[in-house]
């Protein structure tokens, strides 16, 4: 007799999924055939997804293997575009890679120094976050014990005025750790950002050995330093935490060039004031966005990152839609 359970995907590796089921057991599962076809162009199942599974007993063993029969609709998905190789992509040059589904909050982790914050990467993550429908997007500035330059404090204040809460932490001295622990005590949270910003030390400050635990469950099949795409949710207090591999670059998924201004929240508020409804905010007359830039209402580095990303999306859109 087939057993059926609902559950949560807590780990994904090389086409296998570990599902924490409603019977308090965890089962290794694969996608049903029809879902495998859909997964060629997008991650139809990812950590954080709620699924329905059926179980079968492996012949000659006591091991129960699962099949994912259905994936529940998502409330959010933090995704990026990946170039395809081989059979992946179903003939398309890019496919969607879902970093995490159904997250309640995303924390974009950077260091105050060593390395200095990459604001271009931060703005791309914020764009992906705005697209994702995740309820809370936060900036986590680690290594504050190294000091925060006055120029960086000025920049951070602008992000706070845009509505992005900033947590300042030090894994070395414990600054901000209790606030962070309380924030992560419920729901599903994701840490993501570049390498070398002290995420492992931060995890160990939250719970001794947590950094090692995350690496053990999420990094079993690295193709090179920081290139693993395997992901896992780790229990933390009453919630789950996902720590994604260090990101070197990020191309937002499913954003057309003419839509990009909606995901830069400081630019979006001025768009309706532009004379032309299809204004690119580059050289059109009576552009409310460039007027706001001249008045200091939009930071110059944010506008620069908007232009650069728009050009990348435009080139991609032209190539893939010929």
Image (cartoon, grey):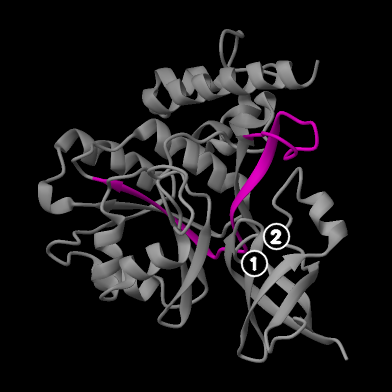
- Asked if residue 254 shows in the view, the reply is no
Seen in the picture, residue 246 relative to 51 is either above or below; the reply is above
For the residues labelled 1 and 2, say whether their Cβ atoms are less than 8 Å apart: yes
What residue appears at the point 29 percent right and 59 percent down from the top-left corner?
200
Tell me the element at label 1: strand
Q: Indicate whether residue 85 is drawn in magenta.
A: yes
Q: Nearer the viewer, residue 160 or 248?
A: 248
Percent from the top left, x then y, of residue 239? 48, 77
Residue 153 figure quarter: top left
Q: Can you identify the residue that label 2 sits on?
A: 45
Q: Can you identify the residue that label 1 sits on?
A: 17
Counting residues from the start of the chain, the first of labels 1 and 2 encountered is 1
Tell me the element at label 2: loop
Tell me where the magenta segment starts and ends, as one range. 83-111
Q: Quadrant of the C terminus?
A: top right
Percent from the top left, x then y, of residue 193? 40, 46
Percent from the top left, x then y, of residue 13? 58, 59
Residue 32, numbered circle: none
């Amino acid at each position: 007799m087939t057993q059926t359970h609902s559950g949560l995907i807590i780990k994904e590796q090389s086409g296998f999924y570990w599902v924490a089921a409603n019977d308090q057991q965890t089962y290794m599962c694969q996608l049903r055939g029809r879902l495998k076809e859909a997964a060629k162009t997008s991650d139809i199942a990812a950590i954080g997804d709620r699924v329905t599974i059926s179980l079968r007993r492996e012949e000659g063993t006591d091991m129960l293997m699962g099949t994912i029969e259905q994936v529940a609709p998502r409330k959010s998905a933090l995704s990026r575009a990946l170039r395809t190789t081989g059979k992946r992509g179903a003939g398309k040059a890019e496919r969607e890679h879902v970093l995490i589904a159904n997250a309640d909050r995303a924390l974009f982790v950077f260091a105050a120094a060593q390395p200095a914050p990459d604001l271009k990467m931060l703005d791309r993550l914020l764009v992906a976050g705005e697209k994702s429908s995740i309820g809370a997007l936060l900036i986590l500035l680690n290594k504050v014990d190294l000091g925060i330059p006055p120029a960086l404090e000025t920049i951070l204040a602008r992000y706070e005025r845009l509505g992005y809460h900033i947590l300042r932490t030090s894994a070395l001295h414990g600054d901000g750790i209790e606030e962070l622990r309380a924030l992560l005590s419920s729901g599903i949270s994701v840490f993501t950002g570049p390498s070398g910003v002290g995420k492992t030390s931060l995890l160990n400050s939250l719970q001794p050995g947590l950094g090692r635990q995350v690496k053990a469950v999420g990094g079993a099949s690295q193709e090179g330093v920081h290139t693993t795409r395997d992901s896992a949710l780790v229990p933390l207090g009453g919630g789950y935490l996902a720590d994604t591999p260090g990101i070197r670059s990020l191309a937002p998924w499913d954003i057309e060039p003419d839509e990009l201004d909606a995901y830069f929240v400081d630019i979006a508020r001025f768009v309706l004031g532009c004379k032309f409804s299809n204004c690119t905010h580059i050289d059109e007359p009576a552009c409310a966005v460039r007027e706001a830039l001249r008045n200091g209402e939009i930071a110059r580095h944010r506008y620069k990152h908007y232009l650069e990303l728009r050009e990348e999306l435009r080139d991609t859109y032209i190539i893939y839609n010929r």
